[in-house]
Image: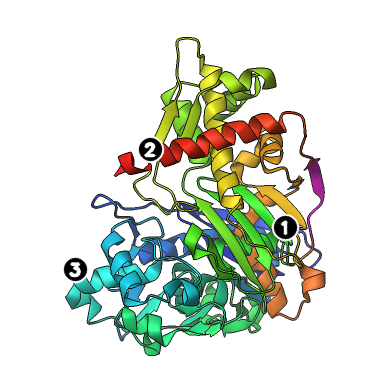
Amino acid sequence: MYLGLDLGTSELKALLLADDHRIVGVARAPLTVDRPQPLWSEQAPGQWWQALEQVMAQLRGAHAGALSAVRAIGLSGQMHGATLLDATGEVLRPAILWNDGRSGAQCEALTRAVPRLGEIAGNLAMPGFTAPKLLWVREHEPEIFDRVARVLLPKDWLRFMLSGEAVSEMSDAAGTLWLDVGARDWSDELLAATGLRRGHMPRLVEGSEVSAQLKSELAARWGVGSGTTVLIAGGAGDNAASAVGMGLVEPGQGFVSLGTSGVVFVSTDRFLPNPAQAMHAFCHALPKRWHQMSVMLSAASAVSWAAKTFRFADEAALLEAAASVAPAQRARCPLFLPYLSGERSPHNNPNAQGVLFGLTHAHEPADIAYAVVEGVSFGLRDGFDTLRLPADMPLREVALVGGGARSVWWGQLLADIFQVPLTLYAGSETGGALGAARLAWLADGGTVAEVCTLPPVRQQLVPSLEGADGHKTRHARFQALYMALRDQFR
């Protein structure tokens, strides 16, 4: 039996996985985000521990026998968060999260200080990453910066509390801007640019390796392991963990995620950065594996915004209205730029804004609904086009995951716009927690072939050639509209 812990932004999820791939139990505990000032996004790490105590109590109450059989624990979670500890291991301030936007000036300073940043880290400096956050702390909270003895990512702080060990793994560390992503090691040059040294960083392991052991007193309190040593795997950042949970670990396998944000993720067998178009190149959770990832900041959240703003009953009602627009009528719909929170890939433009363009008296709510869903789909296609797969690494398989994947109509629209088949798999909603449990299984001696299997196929969405020219025409207008308005967003 294996336990996966997924520390998200809005909840902590725990999942028990049997070694026949059955999900035995799932428990959740909510989390809240503090926004004390504009652009700020923080969480107190103590809240994470309270949530962990809650899910462990839930599992012990409902699945005590399974919990006592756990042999290893895996961790996944939100990336990029800066959790700062002093020399005694105490937290110095609330963790600064991935969606915190206060460090824009520090990103510019870091880029000037290290012209090779993209070459080493595989990514542009963006406020979401960890390193600019530390530059902000050094500038605005120097008394705290001077006391920093260790910087941990959110899930790695949980590991520290579970084991007493300061350890991270390659996929999450790749999102700090301190890792030499090609070499899979900390970069002394990037650390120095933020006033830090290797001693401030946790030890590195691969996601499928043993990183530590669960404290015996915690194992006894929670009824984990029946007195045997419980291993803790390296784990993974949230998207890499989701890929492991879906079995998408071989080169050319990937997914499109229709969550709050939108992600296009493809596994690779080498480091292939493309920072010029704000594509992320990270280590995967398995040895000798990397991945490329594009991120748009408003995907399903844009649909939620439109459903509320235009008074649809809910997101499902908006999608139903959008689906009612006949293909022959789509050319008359408005265009929608989905940049409600700025944008990452491919524009790296925090000032980008949402736009509804081309409205007339003839337009009805269904036309606006279609425009919004289409605009998000075009934004994902732009991110997809930033991926750089070499000729000897063809795109093999793309899954569709996330809450938006519940709409088969939207999935088919994406397949038509991407002109790539999309696969809907059973159980994709378990995401990072399942991947974390699978990484625990690997750390306990399981093989990739045995553990990282693909789930059963629910449906295959094959792109239609009918209407492809219409999608291309509207996509070109969508791109031209952004370029025409880009300077106005400033």
Q: Which of marks 2 and 3 is in front?
A: 2
At horizontal 53% and vertical 73% (from top left) the residue drawn is 221
- Magenta span of residues: 454-460
Expressed as whole percent of the image width and height from the top left, the position of residue 486 reads 37, 42
Q: Is residue 206 left or right of residue 133?
A: right
Can residue 416 be seen? yes
Q: Is residue 468 left or right of residue 162?
A: right
Q: Nearer the viewer, mark 3 or mark 1?
A: 3
Residue position for label 3 = 140
Type of amino acid under label 1: Ile
Residue position for label 2 = 485
Q: Nearer the viewer, residue 92 or 288?
A: 288
Image quadrant assignment for residue 230: bottom right
| Kind of element beneath mark 1 | strand
Q: Quadrant of the C terminus?
A: top left
Image quadrant assignment for residue 395: bottom right
Expressed as whole percent of the image width and height from the top left, the position of residue 129 reads 41, 65
Location of residue 463 with respect to 40 vertically, above or below: above
Q: Which of marks 2 and 1 is in front?
A: 2
